Image (cartoon, rainbow, N blue to C red):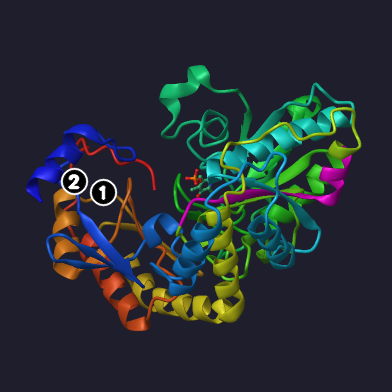
Amino acid sequence: MKEILQFDNEYLWHPYAALRKTPARFLALSAKGTKIQTAEGLELIDAVSSWWCMAHGHNAPEIVEAIQAQSRKMCHVMFGGFTHEPAIELGEKLVSFLPKGLNKIFYADSGSIAVECAAKMAVQYQYAKGHPEKCKLVALKGGYHGDTAGAMALSDPDGMHMLFRGIMPQHYFAERPCSRADGAFDEADFKSMEKVVALHEKEIAAVICEPVFQGGNGMWLYHAEYLKRLRKLCDEKGILLIFDEIASGFYRTGPRFAMEHAGVLPDIVCIGKALTGGSITLAACVASEMVAETITESKISAFMHGPTYMANPLACAAGIASLNLFANRDYRLEVARIEKRLKQNLLPLRNLENAKDVRVLGAIGVLELKAKPSAEDVLKIIRNTGIWLRPFCNYVYTMPPLITTDAELDRICEAIRLIGECEPQPSSDGDDEFHE
Ligand SMILES: *Cc1c(COP(=O)(O)O)cnc(C)c1O
């Protein structure tokens, strides 16, 4: 085991990590339900749903079987010139799962690509409307939309992507909403967005944001009223509204989609992560009839994007099985249960000396610390408690699989408490985990 880990350390780049310098890494052998088995004999409860996608738990048998069955028929076929049943069936299921009015689906191979597609679609829409000058977007500070160049350019401008400014398109940013999801809405919150839009109105194709839950760049939960103002402003100015529900969709914040907290529909929505129940990569950019028709009826009627693995049949089969699971279980109830348990366990952690804030919504629980704990302490707690957590910056959080039991949630919250009680780290320890 030591040898293969050595190879890994020397030759394999991991997400946001250095070659050679990352202190420790677990060798995962298998995973089932909420748990991951490692080569050193640990069984870890996956409290972050393997970066937020493993909604039904690991290796849900229905999903595994769907992938196996599809693989015997056809692993892949190009989506140009061909279509296939898994793509169509998943499309039908998505149209009825998504809010009414969002139904023109572009399958993408990852969340970042879905965001790229949404931005291109907005620009192509404005072009079709006779506004080629409208080719900028407005995004929120503190947002995260992915790692490809176009998606980076829409993520927090002071965040993890600063180094790449030179290759990124330049967009506009409004301040992140300060009103808490669980507090009152402060009217002043919307001023920055109004100002940015007023200043650049003529160039703006769309506004993009993560509704209610800003994930990868700060684990922030903000007031849904903001989204109502945003919808109204976009309507008044002929600007499209894009919601990135890649993290917040599929019941993570309580309802199916976070937009339901505001009762507001976007013109384009991006979904991903839990779409296949975390089994295989697939995302989608879904447009309203109005957006799709405008593009279709224009001179360049084709939407100009098309990845090699578009609508991969294995991924579509996994998506169908995942949507069946979402339909067969009352996840709204499960998430309400999880939220209650997280609140009971985590809200008291506000009193820890090193605590700055605690926030809970749906199956999201965040302990924001004043100073981050050391990577060694976190590792020790993971080993001792058997809880897999992945704190970044000052955020210790859980986004557990939606099937996590109350007893498991208690253990997860206990591990979070232990991390919150660690001696904080005086300065950066060189472990460059920045993201998620
Ligand atoms: C994870 C995430 C993305 C990027 O998705 P990938 O599949 O990692 O490319 C985009 N937006 C949000 C809100 C995300 O949480």
Query: Is 249 situated left or right of 385 in this image?
Result: right
Task: Look at the image and tell me whether residue 357 can be seen.
Answer: no
- Residue 76 is one of the magenta-drawn residues: no
Spot the residue most to the front. Answer: 73
Rendering coords of residue 74 (x, y %): 55, 54
- Residue under the point 49% across and 51% down: 281
In the displayed structure, would residue 124 be above or below residue 312? above
Out of 37 and 66, give the one closest to the viewer.
66
Q: Is residue 54 above or below residue 425?
A: below
Estimate how packed mark 2 is, as few (under 14), some (14 to 19) or many (20 or more) residues with alpha carbons within 10 Å.
Answer: few
From the top left corner, tell me how far across and down residue 252 is, in percent.
53, 65
Q: Element under label 1?
A: loop
Q: Tags 1 and 2 in contact by the CB under 8 Å rule?
A: yes
The magenta segment is 280-294
In 3D space, how far apart are the residues under numbered discs 1 and 2 (Cα atoms)?
6 Å
Q: Is residue 137 above or below residue 309?
A: above
Residue type indicated by callout 1? Lys
Q: Say which mark, if any, is on residue 372.
A: 1
319 and 172: which one is in front? Answer: 319
Q: Compare residues 280 and 193 and report the one nearer the observer.
A: 280
Q: Residue at x 55, y 77 (%)?
A: 331
Give amino acid for label 2: Gln
Q: Is mark 2 within 8 Å of ligand 1?
A: no
Above or below, 319 against 146 in this view is: below
User: On the picture, is 138 further left or further right than 345?
Assistant: right
Q: Residues within 10 Å of mark 1 (few under 14, many from 20)?
A: many
Residue 191 image position (x, y, % from top left): 69, 41
Q: Which residue is mark 2?
A: 425
Percent coordinates x, y for residue 40 in the rendering: 12, 61
